[in-house]
Image (cartoon, rainbow, N blue to C red):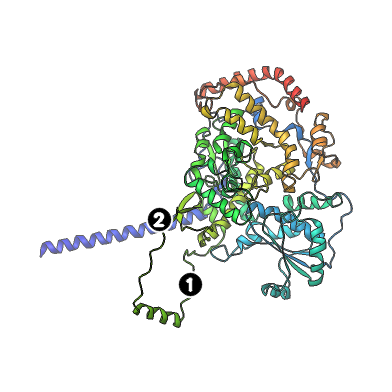
Amino acid sequence: MKGEGKVFFLKSRMKWIGLLGLVLSAFSLLVHFLLAGFTDDSISDYSIPVTLFSWRPVFDNPRFNRHTPLYRRLWGPTRHVESLLPYAIPRGYHSDPPARTNGFVFVRIQGGFHEIRNSIPDVVAVSRLLNATLVIPEIQSTTSSKGISSQFKSFAYLYNEEHFMASLANDVRVVKTLPKNLKWARRKKQIPSFKVSYGSSPYYYLHHVLPVLIKHSVVELVVPHGGCLQAILPTNLEDYQRLRCRVAFHALQFRKEVQELSTKVLQRLRPLGRPFIAYDPGMTREALAYHGCAELFQDVHTELIQHKRAWMIKRGIVKGKLSVDSAEQRLQGLCPLMPEEVGILLRAYGYSWDTIIYVAGGEVFGGQRTLIPLHGMFENVVDRTSLSTGWELAKMYGRESKHKDIRPKTPPSVEEETKHDSSKSIRQRPQPLPPPPARPKYYNIEGWWGWVAESDNEPENTVIELRTNAHKLLWEAIDYVVSVEADVFVPGFDRDGKGHPSFASLVMGHRLYQSASAKTFRPDRKQTAMLLEEIRDHMYEANHTWIASVRKLLKKSIPEGLVESSKRSKAFSFLSHPVPECSCIKRDHRVSNVSLIEADLGVTHRCPQGMDGAVRSKDNKNAEKEEDLDEEDLSSSGFFFGHKESGGSSNSNNETVNSEANNKEEGQLEDQEELEGGER
């Protein structure tokens, strides 16, 4: 009895100790969450990234010299277009919107981030063309109530409504909602609706939509493909192009929470004031399927792309065959550059292993496995997940209800239940076995591959996927801000899953408008593929001749890619190349820039006198000595992986020696550069 009492006492003591441990754990968690909420606004004040983030920058030499020729070649402004300034103000008589209009235009926009951003300036221009009152567009992917934020809805989920309306007060009448009577008629589907095709002409709106608008006082426009007005307008409608620029680059401001997190990401991207590269792979499943680039991947990935391509062919999106020679497509420049290939090009151009590279543009097909070679060549490869925390993203999403993957079902009726019970009592005849299943189809969810049923159709979105699709808009908004502000931008691909300009095209157009001299590479993918094919069997042991060819190609891609963009991209999307309509030339521009800016880009309008001081003047001598360094400063063997050949003490000595050698060599290379410029 005495032993049993002792055992009972020990057991009760252990229970109390366990209960006390649980209480202390719960208390510590509560304190942790309170401290996290308290430090939300102050965490970004640290100048050096703290251990809270998964990225800790690694640099060979923290002291980054901005005054060397090497820095000017890698990070300096593009002198060919330094005199190009943004100028989207109307250039003639511009009347304010009348108090009485022809009616209301209600717009529903479908698609992803770049399609939404490409559509909104178009619908504003169409509203002014029709002399109509624009109802703030409805973004379809954020209107569902299945788990998406109840705090931010539709247009306000992504953009600042008040700023949008205030910025366009002198251009178009904008209201938040339809009047009550028209709102009721829309719910009853009693207002006329137009499903607008991509790049519709002004003639279509003036001769088909306007008469219906005048008759019914309201029309609904459904924009499914990311652009409802043709990119290149007649000369007499040139001010509508500038209106598009005012909408895209001034009125479309992301809402406060998105702006704040984007600013924090930018601050964390520039530790110790170092510049960074933004890289958009452009490798979406839709783009790969549309252009027939399935065989760039293996096994399940190829099957996924082919399944999507078959789906596109069935719906008339793709006109070609199901099986396409991906190798031939790649050599023709119709497939994205792989992250490994982009890394090799950047290392060959001269960017060191510790260069900061921000991976932008949303989902990368194949997941993080595709980016492993890029991580192997550059130590500081990051994205939005490396530079933000879960609670910061949750704050940006807003209040969200708890999701349920199982869709609610209506209970069966009494008749159905009775029929079901009676069928159980009846002895059923044996049924034949189902046919053997064909090869399973797979579906991509954030880089993870899961089996779904055999079907010709894509699986329906679950509740979690609907919410994720809305979140992707916010992720790409952060990537957009970071890419526009980046010191260097590199696109892996500039076409989407419909053959139209993609996220990267809009970024390059915004950079061209806002800061034309910011370094943006536009490599010719056909020439790049040919160069990469030469060293396919020894990609990491390139010789000096090949490295020189890559440098020449990338250097030429800055001005020549800009001219090519004016011929190719602008025909599909005006925002991908808003020049010359939305730009002007600085009055004191150098004569050497006339050929590119005036002859090739067509910019002839001189900026007003007050704008000349907006751009910092550079030393002409330094501007002329911008581009080249002798390739002999790099060894061919082990070039791409030679990270840390020397210690910290010898780094400064090597930098000094290299700087002196580079200054000496630039006099010889300057003549060659001017000769190449004359040939162009």
**Residue nearest the observer in this picture, 42 or 450:** 450
Question: As drawn, is 399 to the left or to the right of 247?
Answer: left
Mark 1 is on which residue type?
Lys
* Residue at the spot 16% in from the left edge and 61% down from the top edge: 7
**Residue 170 is at least partly visible in this image:** no
Q: Label 1: how many residues lie within 10 Å, few (<14), some (14-19) or many (20+)? A: few
Q: Nearer the viewer, residue 452 or 273?
A: 452
**Element assignment for label 1:** loop
Quadrant of the image containing the C terminus? top right
Q: CA distance from mark 2 to mark 1?
A: 41 Å
**Residue 304 x, y percent position in the rendering:** 51, 49
Counting from the top left corner in percent of width and height, residue 630 is at 64, 20
Relative to residue 476, is residue 22 drawn left or right?
A: left
- Residue 28's mark? 2
Q: Residue tagged by mark 1?
A: 409
Sequence-earlier tag: 2 or 1: 2
